[in-house]
Amino acid sequence: MTTRLEFKADLTVTPEGLIEGIAWPFGSADRVGDVIEKGAIAAPVTLPMLFAHDQGQVIGVWDQIEETDAGLTVKGRLLIDDVARAREVQAMISAKAVSGLSIGFVTTKSTPRAKGRTITALSLHEISVVAVPCHPGAQITSLKSDGTAKPTEEQNMNTETIEDPINPSAPANAPQMDTKAFDEIKSRLDKIEAKANRPQGVHITGPVTDPETKAFGNFLRRGVERIAPEEVKALTVANDASAGYLAPQEFGSELIKLLTEFSPIRSYAKVISISAPSIVYPRRVTGTSATWVAEIASRTASGMTFEQVTMTPHELATFTDVSNALLEDNAYNLEGELLSDFAESFARTEGLAFVKGTGAGQPFGIMAASGIAELKTGVAANFPASNPADVLIAMYHMIATTYAQSGVWIMNRNTLAIVRQWKDGNGRYLVLDPITAGAPSTLLGRPVVEMPDMDDVGADTYPILFGDMQGYRIIDRVGLTTLRDPYSLAVNGQVRFHARKRVGADVTHPDRFIKLKCAA
C-alpha cells in the first residue's frame, strides 16, 4: 500500500507580497518514492512564480533560490501591483486557503530504487503556489499536456509538492527585483508561451480544445497502434463490433451541416435516432363512429383498426484512400478533406433515397411511398395552357387545413423556373422572393424547398409535392463511423479510411401530402 504524505506549508505573505518557503526537503521520499539529493538541483537565478502550474497564471517571481540544510529554500514576491491574480493569491494565503508549494522540473540523471528513483541531477523550470499539496499526479498530467514534445522516460516532467513546513515570517526589507531581472523573466515567459502555442501533430480547422478531437486526428494520421494509450482511451468505440471508432462530436456535427446542404429534406422531416435494429409504429386506419339515436333506442357499436409501420435502417458506406506522404505532412488538412469527401458521397446517395428510394436495401422515398394522393395537371406532358396556377391552388386545398398551414412545396430548380413565371389575374408573380436574407421563397404563402432529385416536368412524372414534412420520418441507427486500414494498401504507400452509417426513412402520415402528376 502506498503511503500518502501530506505536509501543508503554513505560508504567510506580507502586505508587500513577499513570500518564502522550502520548495523541496532533501533526504525524504515523495509519495511515489522519488528522492532528490542535495546538489541535484540546477536552478537559474530567477524563476517564474505560477499558480497551480498554469502557464497562463504568472503571479510573481522567485529571485532567491538556494540549497540549504533544510532543503531548497526560495524567496520571491507576488506582483500585486500589476497582476490581479497575484492579489487574489495573496488574500488566499493570508486566509490559509492556499498552503503549499510545488516544483516543476525535468530529470536529467537518476538511478532506480526499490520504489521510485534517486534523482541526482535535474533542471528546475518553475515553482508554483498550490492550494492543497496532496495530488501530485494531477499536477503531472497538467504539466505534460502543455502541447510540447514529450520527453523521454529519463526526462519526464515532474511536479513534487512541499513536504515540510516553512518559516512563516518574511523580512520586511526583502530585496526588490530590479528592472534587468524582470526583463530576463519576461523574456523567459515569452519563450515558454510561444512554445506552448505552437501547433502540434494534427491540424484541423479551428483550435483543438478537447482530447477526443485531438486523439481522433492522431488516430487518422498514425493509426491506433502508434498513438499513446491515453489517446486510445479517448477514442469512442462504436457499439457494432465491426464499426471501428466513432468520429468526435465536432466531426459528426459538421457532417450534419453539410448533409443539410445536399439533402434539405432533413431540415423539414422528423429525424430521430434509435438503438434497435428496427422500430415499429402503430398507425390508426379507422376510428370510432358516433350515431344519432332516440332516447331509448339501441346504440350502434363501433371500433378502431390499426396497422403497423416498420422502419428498418439500411447501411450506407464509402471509403477514401490517402497516401502516407499526405498523412505525414503536418500542414495538410486531413480532417477537412475527409469530411468534405465523405459528406458529399453520403449526402448525394442519401438525398436521392429520401426522394425516390424503393425500400429494398435503402430507405423508402417520399415520392415512392404508397397512400399519397395525387392530382393530375390535365395535360399529358405539361401544365394546362391557360390558368396553370389553378392546379397548384387545387393542390393546396386538397389536404387538411392544419397540414396545409405547415406545408412546404418541394420541386427541383428546373420546375421552379417554370412556376416562377406564373402570374395571377393582376399580373403579380405567384412565387414571392424572401424579404429577409436566408429565408425561402414562398408560393401561396408557404415555403418552396428546392430538391434536386425531384422529377422534371414531363409525361407521367411527379414534379411537385406539397405537404407537412413531419409526416415523413428519418431514423438514424449509427452515426458516421470510421475505420483506418493501414495494411491492405501498405505496398502502395497508402492508408484506406472506411466510413459508414445506417439510416432508414418512410412516410408515416400519407394523408399529409399531395403530389402532382403530369397526365391528362
Image: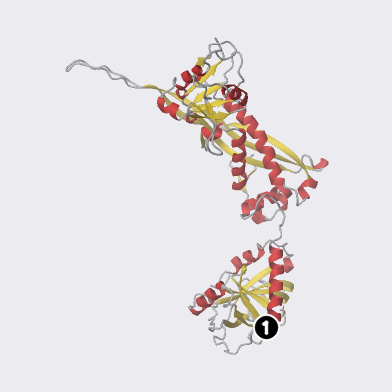
Image point (60%, 47%), residue name: 250
Is residue 249 visible to us here? yes
Residue 190, percent from left and from top: 70, 69
Residue 446, percent from left and from top: 49, 29
Image point (73%, 73%), residue name: 111
Residue 202 vertical position relative to residue 9 in the rendered view, above or below: above
How many C-alpha atoms fall within 10 Å of the one at disc 1: few (<14), some, or many (≥20)?
A: few
The answer to which image quadrant residue 336 occupies is: top right
Left or right: residue 2 compared with residue 323:
left
The answer to which image quadrant residue 438 occupies is: top right
Quarter of the figure that contains the N terminus: bottom right
How many marks can you see?
1
Q: Secondary structure at mark 1?
A: loop
Per the image, the residue denoted by label 1 is: 178
Quarter of the figure that contains the C terminus: top right
Q: Amino acid at mark 1?
A: Asp
Left or right: residue 37 compared with residue 252:
right
